[in-house]
Image (cartoon, rainbow, N blue to C red):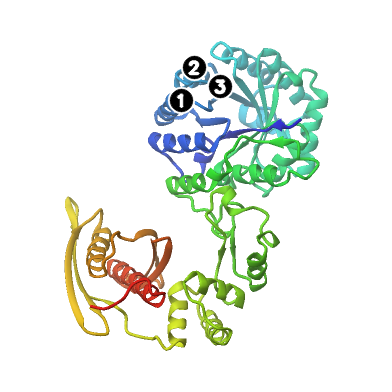
Amino acid sequence: MKEKIFIFDTTLRDGEQSPGASLTPQQKLEIALQLERLGVDIIEAGFPIASSGDFEAVSLVAKNIKKCQVAALARAKKEDIDTAYSALKFAKNPRIHTFIATSDIHIKYKLRMTKEEVLETAVDAVKYARKFTDNVEFSCEDAARSNLDFMCKVIEEVIKAGAKVINIPDTVGYSIPEEFGNLIKQIKNRVPNIDKAIISVHCHNDLGLAVANSISAIINGARQVECTINGIGERAGNASLEEIVMIIKTKQRYPMLQKFYTDVNTKEIYHTSRLVSNLTGIVVQPNKAIVGRNAFRHESGIHQDGVIKKRQTYEIIKPQDVGVPSSELVLGKHSGRHALEKRLVELGYKVSKKILDRIFVKFKSLADKKKYVFDEDIIALVNEELGKGRQQFVELNYFHINSGSGVLPTATVELKIRSKLKIMTFREAEFGDGPVDAAYKAIDKILCNVFNLKTVPKLVDYQLKAISSGKDAQGEVIVRFEYDHEISTGRGISTDIIEASIKAYISCWNNFLIKQEVTNKIKISL
């Protein structure tokens, strides 16, 4: 019979303690609602006594979350517990999470208490919290460095006092998996009433072992894991929710893990990751497991060939299972012929082996000069090889922007459009949410009208970066838009980022129009 692992998400409490990750109450609610859709069991919404803002956030989450338990942290002090419950009182299923340190170093230098005083304080705190709710969790802070006999005594007594969940934190990320797993096993064997509580773990990542320690704890008896989205948190962060959940899901044939499951809807993982990253401002590292930009990207020619033939050769997780639309074959200097051919077909080009060989030689030469080869680069190579090299359909003739504080951003754009028969000039003005948005709307208005397109393309990606240093640095803009389920890409460079943005969008349109003409989807004639 399978056993459930409860997912206790502390992104809004411990995750927010990452330097610079401060969230407003409304932002916390936005994340909490997404965590509810994700399917976590408990949301730790904050530490209410820490600030009025934290109190407001916990209260707001408590009022709006219906499917998850909502927890608030409280030191083993009456005023903390009172404040926690005041913030939680409207929650459908509130949990008070109280804690005190049990390690010798914390007791002596931080708390300046005796062990007897710590034991008494812990028991009193749980008894007091039970006056408000029977859903009480108790944490032995710095458990991984605590004296085992003393900690087991504390655990036994707080369970007698009414604690339903006992959390064993590796507060400073000191343990290794075998050691931490053994600690959980020892607690199960030594605490006589441990069967009356759920064992939880809360692992930090100071040695890069938070997820490994959490999995070891599950194997040895823990049934709740405390974790955060993207692994954010104090110092090196916490155990990563997405990694723990996907390890359990992926390793269902592994004897030690096959009896466990979670209620997390894994298809919401990627969206949740991006939301947390956007609101906290903490960028997800590209090689981050499960949710990193490179997690489902392949550049090596050998890997690309394998994935094309059978995805499982180099992917143990389907990208769609975590909410990523698809794998991506990144075209660069390590890419092979099969990946290039596949991308050409996706772009609408079917070429002979002879022509493919010639394009591939030029592709490799280009890839040696730049990090990535984009779709427009490939289109240019194809057009050159097929003798279809030609001037761009659309050129920027003029633009004027009116924008500023208290001013509705307006853009006037004039485009020169070429065909085999003639050159014509068109001008439009539009309002927008900003100068770039206004300019893009003006461009769409001109080109959709000229080429009889019923809908405007959907902008799916906009990236701006400096390609040199200093005040006069050039900005490079890369944009991608989608039209009729096809993606087109464009780039623009200028010391003026608005001009670079407009050039990139026109480049995107040109590549779209070239592809449409080559595949006979539209006829370019004015």
Residue position marked by numbered label 3 in the rendering: 96
The residue that appears at 23% across and 85% down in the rendered structure is: 421
Disc 3 crowd rating (10 Å Cα; few below 14, some 14-19, many 20+) is many
Q: Is residue 459 left or right of residue 426?
A: right
Front-lying residue, 227 or 75:
227
Give the number of the mark in front: 2 or 3.
3
Residue 62 marker: 1
Q: Amino acid at mark 2?
A: Asp
Q: Earlier in the sequence, mark 1 or mark 2?
A: 1
Can you tell which quarter of the image residue 172 is in? top right
Give the number of the mark in front: 1 or 3.
1
Disc 1 crowd rating (10 Å Cα; few below 14, some 14-19, many 20+) is many
What quarter of the picture does the N terminus occupy?
Answer: top right
Q: Is residue 364 left or right of residue 120?
A: left
Residue position marked by numbered label 2 in the rendering: 82
Could you tell me how far apart the alpha carbons at marks 1 and 3 are, in whole angstroms?
12 Å
Q: Amino acid at mark 1?
A: Ala
The residue that appears at 44% across and 19% down in the rendered structure is: 90
Expressed as whole percent of the image width and height from the top left, the position of residue 302 reads: 67, 72
Could you tell me how far apart the alpha carbons at marks 2 and 3 are, in whole angstroms?
10 Å
Can you tell which quarter of the image residue 516 is in? bottom left
Give the number of the mark in front: 1 or 2.
1
Can you tell which quarter of the image residue 459 is in? bottom left
Could you tell me how far apart the alpha carbons at marks 1 and 2 are, in whole angstroms?
15 Å
Above or below 289: residue 480: below
Front-lying residue, 186 or 225:
225
Expressed as whole percent of the image width and height from the top left, the position of residue 508 reads: 36, 70
